[in-house]
Image (tube, grey):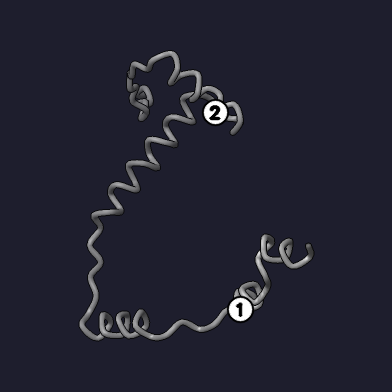
Amino acid sequence: MARAAQRKDRPLAMRFPDADLAIIDRAASQRGRSRTEFVRDAAVRAAEEVLMENVVIRMSSAGFETFVSILDAPPAPVPQLVELLKRPAPWERDRNTR
């Protein structure tokens, strides 16, 4: 006898004030998502962030020394940033043209 497929989704009931639902619905609409999809994605993303804050990264002593030496090394200049920082700020240019 064939067994019915078990549903893997589980319901989660929550209560929201009308103002919270309105902003959630607005944001979900802008993303083209349903309220359920939007809230589920936001909740899962927030949960992943919390869990990642407590992840332990293990490495060998040699690997750690390499990692620290890279962090301690002076940064390589980024040519685009160097050029940008040489330009006068907009408020400095306006002052010079008066």
Residue type indicated by callout 2: Ala
**1 or 75: nearer the viewer:** 75
Return the mark for residue 1: none
Q: Position of residue 89 (x, y in %)?
A: 65, 65
Q: According to the image, label 2 marks what residue?
A: 28
Side of 16 relative to 97 (left or right): left
94, above or below 80, in the image: above
Disc 2 element: helix
Residue type indicated by callout 1: Val
Q: Position of residue 40 (x, y in %)?
A: 42, 32
Q: Residue furthest top?
A: 18
Residue at 56% x, 29% y: name it. 33
Residue 1 seen by the camera: no
Disc 2 residue crowd, few under 14, some 14–19, many 20+, Cα 10 Å? some
- Mark 1 vs mark 2: which is more N-terminal? 2
Q: According to the image, label 1 marks what residue?
A: 82
